[in-house]
Amino acid sequence: MEGICGFISFDRALVDIPISIQEMAHSLSDGETLDYEFTMNSNWAMARSYCPGKTTCRKTFLYHDAELSLVAVADIYNAAELAPEYDGEKSEIGKVLAACYKKNGREWAVKIRGNFAIILFDVKKNQMIAITDRFGVRPLVWHKRGNTFYFASRMNAIAELVRPLDVNNAAVYAYIQLEMIPAPMTIYKNVHKLEP
């Protein structure tokens, strides 16, 4: 399954970044063959997984330049409309989303139509931004340990790197009562689903 994951530390350089991000990314697979793309520096890393050879159905995007890094899992319905406005091609969704953020700042998300989960790291502001679509179709879960944030489109990517994770009894009770776990809760304590 295609997905995104990563982590960022706001107070120190992390060790073993390449190994850690690869472990997270490989846990996004349900057993199918996936390819991976990474971007990282001394205190953060992002990755996307995608089906090899299927360029027309890719749903994950990674973009990196000197000012920002962005990773997304998305169906952007207005990509053809956004691309010319932000000097990109319809197929360059990561570049278009980055240009949209650079031009519109905090208001950039209102320009995007579709279902998406996006993590953006603004290098100049040393700020991480996480957004999901208005209905939460594309999930994004996160965990904070110390001053390090871990995020992923699938829970098992966080569970792969952050151990131990304890079961959230309140979430189990909610599941028994409601047959679902309401956001921001997840099955694990201190792992949260980002609300729309």
Image: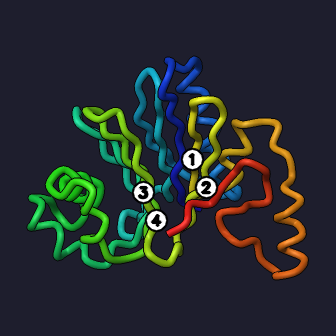
Q: Are marks 1 and 2 in contact (CB under 8 Å)?
A: yes
Spatial distance from mark 1 to mark 2, Cα to Cα? 6 Å
Please tell me which of labels 3 and 1 falls first in the chain: 3
User: Residue at position x 64%, y 29% from top?
Assistant: 146
Give whichever of 185, 66 is nearer the camera. 185
Please tell me which of labels 1 and 2 falls first in the chain: 2
Pointer 4 residue:
132
Q: Position of residue 32 (x, y in %)?
A: 65, 58
User: Residue at position x 29%, y 70% from top?
Assistant: 110
Name the amino acid type tagged 3: Ile
User: Residue at position x 22%, y 54% from top?
Assistant: 105
Q: Are marks 4 and 3 in contact (CB under 8 Å)?
A: yes
Spatial distance from mark 3 to mark 1, Cα to Cα? 10 Å
Q: Is residue 43 left or right of residue 29?
A: left
As drawn, the label of residue 151 is 1
Name the amino acid type tagged 4: Thr
Please tell me which of labels 4 and 1 falls first in the chain: 4
Pointer 2 residue:
141
Spatial distance from mark 4 to mark 3, Cα to Cα? 6 Å
Pointer 3 residue:
118
Residue 83 appears in which quarter of the rendering? bottom left
Q: Position of residue 172 (x, y in %)?
A: 88, 66
Element under disc 4 = strand
Name the amino acid type tagged 1: Phe
